Amino acid sequence: MFTERTSLGLDVHARSVRAAAIDTRTGEVIERVVSPRTVDVVGFVTDLTRQHGPVLVTYEAGPTGYGLARGLLAAGHRTQVAAPSKLLRPSGERVKTDRRDAMLLARLARNDDIVAVTIPTPAQESARDLVRAREDVRAALMSARHQLSKLLLRHGYVYLQGKAWTGGHDRWLRRIGTHELGADGVGTRAAFDDGYTAVTQLLARRDRLDEQILALAADSEYTAITRRLGCLGGSRH
């Protein structure tokens, strides 16, 4: 529920923050462009609070993360992070600008029309970073494997002795790369070596991240729920 005197919307970007505030007592609109540094945004909100009473700060969840929200909350400013997919945008608005986005957030917050997301703790965001890194490596590994397979297929090599990307498949790859691809030209051999090295390195990266995730699951705030989910997984086998 909106209980503050002033509603402040922030359109946050990596290099600048567009601010738009509405003083609900006087009707005054305050607009500024602020440095994206958390300390500068907090300073602006603190000054705004001195002049226009308590402030509710709202900005959209996005690539800049939640450090700004945590900094504002630590300074005593009520802050909410809006779910972008739930914003009620005007149907006739075809051109988005930073100024309009900041003002829209201020108005929606004033009218209690913001669907807020949960602001993660630093520990929770750290765990998310780890899992996202693992997912990025998984996608890169799939792509590298696909590229290597297509290279071999163009030269007539298809693995037919079982499942791909197993120990047997790896021995087959190394045999072809060592003894057979050289006849197809130096460029082909170099491309194979590069692709095979990429797959090997990505596998090592994935394994290291898996170890970190297992360690986090074994001794962290997620241990209990991980064990419960592990029991559900075991029941399917």
Image: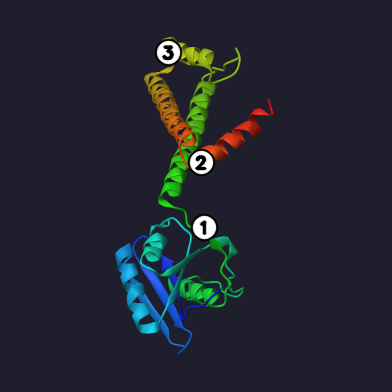
Residue 173 at x, y percent in the picture: 48, 16
Image position, residue 197 (x, y; %): 39, 24
Please provide percent x and percent y for residue 169: 53, 15
Q: Is residue 185 left or right of residue 154?
A: left
What residue is rendered at 47% in x and 88% in y?
A: 25
Tag 1: amino acid? Thr
Residue type at mark 3?
Ala
User: Circle 1 sits on which residue?
Assistant: 118
Which residue is labeled 3 in the image? 183
Residue at the (53%, 21%) spot, across then down: 165
Inter-mark Cα distance, 2 to 1: 17 Å
Looking at the rendered image, the disc whose residue lies closer to the viewer, 3 or 1, is 1
Q: CA distance from mark 3 to mark 1?
A: 59 Å
User: Does 128 appear above or below 2?
Assistant: above
In the rendered structure, find residue 154 and report the number of the disc placed on it.
Answer: none
Crowdedness of circle 3 by 10 Å Cα count: few (<14), some, many (20+)? few
Dot 2: element: loop
**Mark 2 touches mark 1? (CB < 8 Å):** no
Residue topped by disc 2: 222
**Can residue 7 be seen from the camera position used here?**
yes
Q: The disc labelled 2 sits on which kind of residue?
A: Tyr
N-term mark: 3 or 1: 1
Q: Quadrant of residue 194?
A: top left
